[in-house]
Structure formats: structure tokens, C-alpha cells
Image (cartoon, rainbow, N blue to C red):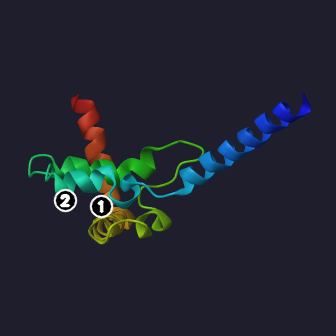
Amino acid sequence: MLFPALDIFILSVLFTGLADHTRQLTTSSDAVPYECREALVEKNWIEGNRLSKLQDMVLSDYRNYSYRYTSRLDASRVDRMHPACREFFEKIRVIAEDSEILTLFKTRADLEMRKN
């Protein structure tokens, strides 16, 4: 009777380890995130919505109050991306670090909220 319990224990430890290992592997969304796919592959960033989408990405760190939040623009995250996406996100990070542009985007977001 002891051996079936031991077998079940070993299998559960084995599958738990495999699940943890699988979570560490990169996925296609790590290499080409949604925002990059929308802008560069699908070409959905058109003249009419480009500024709003850029504003949302730049203000995503400012608006997030999560305890364990990892920025979309975090260097370790960006380094794992496809080269085209890496360049895209690095340019957005430069924009996000500019305090004048950040202030303009915050003001624009406040005006949009008042309008709606």
C-alpha cells in the first residue's frame, strides 16, 4: 500500500516541476508582444489612433497600481524581444522618460476623461 502513495507523490512532484519549467520558457508573445504586433505586423496604428495608442503605452506605468507590476518597457523584458520590437519599445521608452512629453500626455488624458 505504501508504494502507490509514493508513486503518486513522485508523479505530482515531477509534473509540478515540469509545469514550473514550462512557465520559464519564452513564448511568442514575449518575442513579439501584442502592441508590437498591432503596430508593425497588423499595421493597425493609423494616423487617426497612433497618438492615443502611444499615449496609452507611455502612461501604462503611470496608471498601474499593481503591487507586482512589471513595466512593458522594462529593459530585461525588451531584451528578449525580436529586434524590430526591441527598437519599437526602446523608442517608446525614450518618449516615456521625457518629462515634458509625459506631462503633455497626462494633460491630454485628463482632457479626454473630462470630454467623455
Identify residue type, mark 2.
Answer: Leu
**76, above or below 33, in the image:** below
Residue 61 percent coordinates (x, y): 44, 51
Relative to residue 91, is residue 102 depicted above or below? above
Is 11 placed left or right of 42 in the picture?
right
60 or 5: nearer the viewer:
5
- From this viewpoint, which residue is outermost toward the left? 47
Amino acid identity at mark 1: Ile
Disc number lying in front (2 or 1): 2
Q: Is residue 115 left or right of residue 89?
A: left
Residue beneath disc 2: 40
Quadrant in the picture for the C terminus = top left
Residue under label 1, please give it: 101
Q: Quadrant of the N terminus?
A: top right
Is disc 1 surrounded by few (<14), some (14 to 19) or many (20+) residues within 10 Å? some
Specify which label sits upstream in the sequence, 2 or 1: 2
Disc 2 to disc 1, C-alpha distance: 23 Å
Residue 36 x/y as whole percent? 27, 57
22 relative position to 45: left or right: right
Q: In the rendered view, would you say 108 is above or below 58? A: above
- The residue at the point 29 percent across, 71 percent down is 87
Residue at 32 percent across and 58 percent down: it is 32
Instruction: Point out residue 7 in the picture as x, y percentages from the top left corner.
Output: 79, 38
Residue at point 43% right, 67% down?
A: 80
Return the residue nearer the eye: 57 or 39.
39
State the SS at label 2. helix
What percent of the width, then of the height, locates residue 19?
A: 60, 46
Give above or below for 11 relative to 32. Answer: above
